[in-house]
Image (tube, helix red, strand yellow):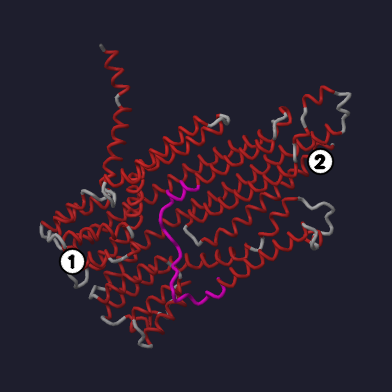
Amino acid sequence: MSAEVGTDEQSGPLPDSVTDLFEDVGEAYDQLDIPRRRYVGYVLVPSAAFFLVTIVVALLMEFALLIRLPIAGLGALLFVAAAIYPKLYLNSRKVSIENKLHLVMTHMTVLSTTNIDRMEVFRTVADEEEYDAAADEVAQVVHLVDTWNQSLDDALRRRAQQVPSGNLSDFFDRLGYTIAAGQELSEFLLSEQETVMENYITVYEGALSNLEVMKDLYMSMILSMTFALVFAIVLPILTGNNPTLTVSAVIVLFMLVQLGFYVAIRAMAPFDPLWFHSEEGAPNDQVLYGSFVVGVLTTFATITFVGMGVFDMGPGLRGILFFMQDIPLPLYVAIPITPMAITGIVVRLEEGRIKNRDEQFPSFIRALGAAESAKQSTTGDVLETLHRKDFGALSDSVVRLYRRLNMRLDATEAWYTFASDNRSYLIQKFSGMYLQGRKMGGDPGQLGELISENMTTVCQLRQQRDQATVTLVGLLYGITAASSFAFFIGLQIVNILADFSEQLNISTVGSVGRIVYAGVYNIPLIEFLLLLVILFNAVLSSVMIRTIDGGNKANAYLHFVLLTWLGALTAIGTKALVAAVLSI
């Protein structure tokens, strides 16, 4: 009897977990933008039919099993993706809400301290397209109040039951009961600031912790794939199989593994963009765009120059590296892309200045709000003395803001240009909140203190993100060097064995001919394929770094060039090292 109970207890959790999973997916179907029946009829049924067709095709084909299985696997992948898409869709909305909830809450708090109606607070936030899913949820509350004539507290509690984010759902629920109890919206939101920022810190740090786990898993998988690729290079010399097909198959799997990890890292990385791109532009736009044009044109010119040399239509690298008798193949890959580093360096320097301005903005907005509150004066009058203070990298932008306001330009345009000059996403959002709060009669001291505290918290989280980025950079550069060394040490050993076997008289030494199959190798082609792996690794690794640090896409150019050069130089050094060791 006890044995039966023990068996039930051990087997119970698995069915429960599977049942919960199916229930979650089923509930997700009800929260899609289209009805459940329409989604099943238009998406799920066709994908299931396609899956059955792929199974039939795989069974009727006369090819090898390794060719037929991927066909059925493609149909299965499409069907599973269609079946779980509603759950993935809700998860993406949850991540989008939690990534921007701190901005939504800060914006609502700023508006609640002004002289506008509380429903106008919700309408204003709902109109902010940058808040994405969070703005949509607030818009649903507004819709329930305006269209269905529900009270605000009832609308909040009703919507709280359907919000995919637990943090926003709890907030709506608490706010609904608080409003029903008669508490002012501003009092509740001010008291909730600490809780919201703590939740944001938890989400942010949780994402960074997940990235740490992904980095360890990524290193293990890439090292395993490196071993598999080296094995695919060396094994055919003993078996006589076609090494080009074997190496190509492993390379495709290698690339798919890297691509999968990039997608996972992109989904896990916290949303915290650094740059703000305005339509008006910024003072040093010419430098950035000029560096991009120079980098692109120089790269194309270098590729053309090197390519013409390869086809004997010009001097090529032989004309530049005339002192080298035999130019290594990796240099034909690394040298043409080098000019891209020009754009990467310029963008990287600008990102450093943006980060410095972000660190100075909390002290500036706090001082501005306190001065306006004490003097009971306008922003332009306060900046007359405040612009002389040293705000570090932000000082020049503060001076230009003072001059625009002193010339009686529109305050909205002046502050928008201030954000454009700084190129900072956070400065653009928080300065816009401060201006909106001031226009609607909010207390400047309270606004400045609120915005300063929240932005300081985000800047502190960014420091943790920068540390995570530094460790990722070290990991990716180390993996690039290690994998390149392993690739080319295997290739060079095979190359030396092939040269050695060619020196033997196979007709008289028949046993060697049966053990070593050197004739199946096309060494230049395999080396070219390995260089493609180095290029692909450099592309994805540089994009991973850009995804985690939240910087500009052009920032990946510098890492792409450096990673390519690291792989190329490692390949050249490995070939020279193996040749020197075996020649001793």
Q: Quadrant of the C terminus?
A: top right
Image quadrant in which you'd find residue 130:
bottom left
Viewer-closest of 361 and 354: 354
Residue ID for mark 2: 580
Is residue 272 located in the magenta-colored stretch of the structure?
yes
Element type at mark 1: helix
Viewer-closest of 259 and 404: 259
Q: Residues within 10 Å of mark 1 (few under 14, many from 20)?
A: some
Give the Cα distance between marks 2 and 1. Answer: 78 Å
Q: Tell me which residue sits at (56%, 50%) in the image.
A: 541
Q: Mark on residue 8?
A: none
Q: Tell me which residue sits at (34%, 66%) in the image.
A: 452
Image quadrant in which you'd find residue 291:
bottom right
Residue furthest bottom as drawn: 407
Q: Amino acid at mark 2?
A: Ala
Q: Which residues are magenta?
A: 262-288
Q: Quadrant of the N terminus?
A: top left
Q: Tell me which residue sits at (39%, 65%) in the image.
A: 426
Q: Mark on residue 118?
A: 1
